[in-house]
Amino acid sequence: MHTKTKEDFLNGQVLLIDKPLGWTSFQAVNKLKWVIKKKFDLKKIKIGHAGTLDPLATGLLLICTGKFTKTIAELQGQIKEYTGTIMLGATTPSYDLETSIDETFSTTHITDALIEKTLPQFIGNIEQTPPIFSALKKDGKRLYEYAREGIEVNIKKRNVHISAFEITGKDNTSIHFRVVCSKGTYIRSLAYDFGKALNSGAHLTSLKRTKIGDFNVDNAVAPSVFEEKLLGKDLN
């Protein structure tokens, strides 16, 4: 990261951040906002992210400052790439590790051939139901709020586009994958539906966003590195 001036941030930057595990996207934005304000003694600065990552997901988060916050909607619409791991044979209410396993299934019938045969069902235009444990709003309330209260709600299915879904490795019941998809795709729902299609169950155990359009996580820095570089501190 080259040393940037106050004017750079006010005029607009797209900052590539590698979001750590356990952080919300909002926490990452707030951290950068604090660092930039502290460095340049600013009372306020426009800042926002282009596409939420769940706390249990890591990887590329685009954070826009100044006038570049106007490009957020455009950036959110870009094609995204993810890598991660799906665990076969068990489901969770949140479709990931946020909640505990609620049901287990046999995996003895699942062969490499069956996996390869099932993959094409999830390539192209597909319909999926977003997880109940998500930040989507229904009647002004976030879905995860209903979920935590044990209230059942009807969630509208959505059309998404998957341009690539490939298995990159297999380790017992853990499947490592790479997905390239459109805006609005829930990889957790993909994992859940994939398990169902295999006549078993599945949930997501790890997820990393590697690309958004032409932006790559390889060029991103952790929030702590951003702070260290901008404030000139050795934080170790």
Image (cartoon, rainbow, N blue to C red):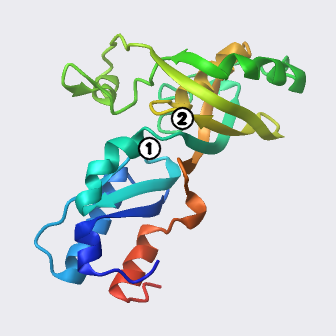
Q: Is residue 51 visible?
A: no
Residue found at x 31% / y 67%: 32
How many numbered discs sit on the rendered protein? Answer: 2
Residue 154 % position (x, y) = 35, 10
Query: What residue is disc 1 on?
Result: 54
Residue found at x 33% / y 20%: 150
Label 2 close to label 1 by CB (< 8 Å): yes
Of the residues tagged 2 and 1, which is closer to the observer?
1
Badge 2 element: loop
Kind of residue at disc 2: Asp
For the residues marked 2 and 1, what is the alpha-carbon distance in whole angstroms? 10 Å
Earlier sequence position, callout 2 versus callout 1: 1
Q: Is residue 144 left or right of residue 6?
A: right
Residue found at x 29% / y 23%: 146
Category of crowding for the residue at label 2, using alpha-carbon neighbours closer than 10 angstroms: few (below 14), some (14–19), many (at least 20): many
Q: Residue furthest left?
A: 43
Q: Is residue 119 left or right of residue 91?
A: right
Residue 223 % position (x, y) = 41, 68
The relative height of residue 147 versus residue 170 in the rendered view (above or below) is: above
Q: Quadrant of residue 155?
A: top left
Q: Is residue 117 left or right of residue 127?
A: right
Pick the residue in front: 61 or 146: 61
Residue 66 % position (x, y) = 23, 62
Kind of residue at disc 1: Asp
Pick the residue in front: 146 or 42: 42
Q: Quadrant of residue 202?
A: top right
Q: Which mark is residue 119?
A: none
Badge 1 element: loop
The relative height of residue 205 versus residue 40 in the rendered view (above or below) is: above
Query: What residue is disc 2 on?
Result: 96
